[in-house]
Image (spheres, helix red, strand yellow):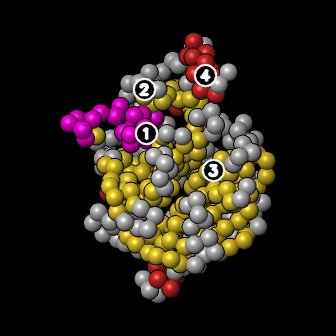
Amino acid sequence: MMKNEFLASRRQFIKQSGLVSLGMGFCDSFILKSLLKDFVIGHGDYKYKVDLNWGTLDKNAYPVNDCHEMVYTKEGNIFLLTNEVKNNILVYNKDGKLIRSWGKSYPGAHGLTLSDEGGEEFLYITDTKRHAVIKTDLKGKEVMILHFPRASRHYTKPEQYLPTETAIALNGDIYVADGYGSQYIMNYDSRGRLKRIFGGKGDGEDQFNNAHGIAIDKRNGKERLLITARMQNKLKYFTLDGKYESSIDLPGAYICRPVIKNKEVYLATIWSGEGESNSGFVSILNEYNELVSAPGGCQPVYENGSLTPMHQTAQVFKHPHDVCVDEDENLYVCQWNAGKVYPIKLLRV
């Protein structure tokens, strides 16, 4: 059986088993916590059963603070980054069992990017308090550090540089988004030598207000940068040499980094509406960059080609900060400022 046929068969089984009992594509004003055990969220072909127990650990032994980002390795393990220095990295299997933990030196741990380089996988950690990007192997050995980019002449002191995310191109070039600092995008070669800098804070098409996330989009066969402009409710396309191309408008959605898996883009939406606290959901874009599902949010509606403003409708999440996607297209959602909770798993149905 081909993979897609297997996934479709499995989803049909789950539906026929009676697991889809709530949230069938409509938006509820709120849900009781006790109902989340069998609650299904999402729209169209992107619906998910909520699992609040996945990844829960002994908080005394393995505490988390802000659970910022997650990545999925080729071995099928999930790496979670938290800014809790007792264990900055928690490594899970897909069942939510802890495999190991490491890291005590990343107080501002924020962004986590996985890169396969010649068959070996590496992590890129952005640390807003260390004002640096740290490259490690999967066991935590540091192999390169990119400090604040004094050579760019846009920065005179480390405090101006608060990097939030990285993306790695096929040629090994490293792109760093300074999302909490001066809003520039730094482009380094694979050895960490600065090649160019672009963007910066502003309201122009080629500028950013909170360049929170960055990814390499290869879906149309050509590498392009897909960069978050969170406070502008937009994603922006740039060429690899820093030229602005176009924008995707997502009104009412304050998005974190774009996560590209197969033909879709997944976005943790940390706030919605007018930016109220505890109002997050997940946004899913199709291959045409149309919002097709918003688990925890309202039904996406387009009028005259434009998306109507989005808002939360089911308080499954408080402040989603990242989405991790496994090979079965299940989602794992980690959160910022959410009571030090562990990630929530969304089982696709």
Check disc 1 and give the amino acid type: Glu
For image coordinates 20% across by 36% down, the residue present is 304
Using the image, determine if residue 247 lies above or below residue 184: above
Check disc 4 and give the amino acid type: Glu
Check disc 2 and give the amino acid type: Gly
Q: Which residues are magenta?
A: 282-306
Of tags 2 and 4, the one toward the viewer is: 4
| 90 lies left or right of 169 | right
Q: In 3D space, how far apart are the residues under numbered discs 2 and 4 (Cα atoms)?
A: 18 Å
What is the quadrant of residue 54 in the picture? top right
Instruction: Measuring from the top left, give residue 274's x and y in whole percent.
Output: 30, 49
Q: Are marks 2 and 1 in contact (CB under 8 Å)?
A: no
Which is more N-terminal, label 1 or label 2? 2
The residue beneath circle 2 is 44
Mark 1 crowdedness (10 Å alpha carbons): few <14, some 14-19, many ≥20: few
For residue 315, say whether it is visible.
Answer: no
Instruction: Measuring from the top left, give residue 48's x and y in whole percent.
Output: 53, 29
Q: Secondary structure at mark 1?
A: loop
| 19 lies left or right of 290 | right
Q: Which mark is residue 209?
A: none
| 125 lies left or right of 233 | right
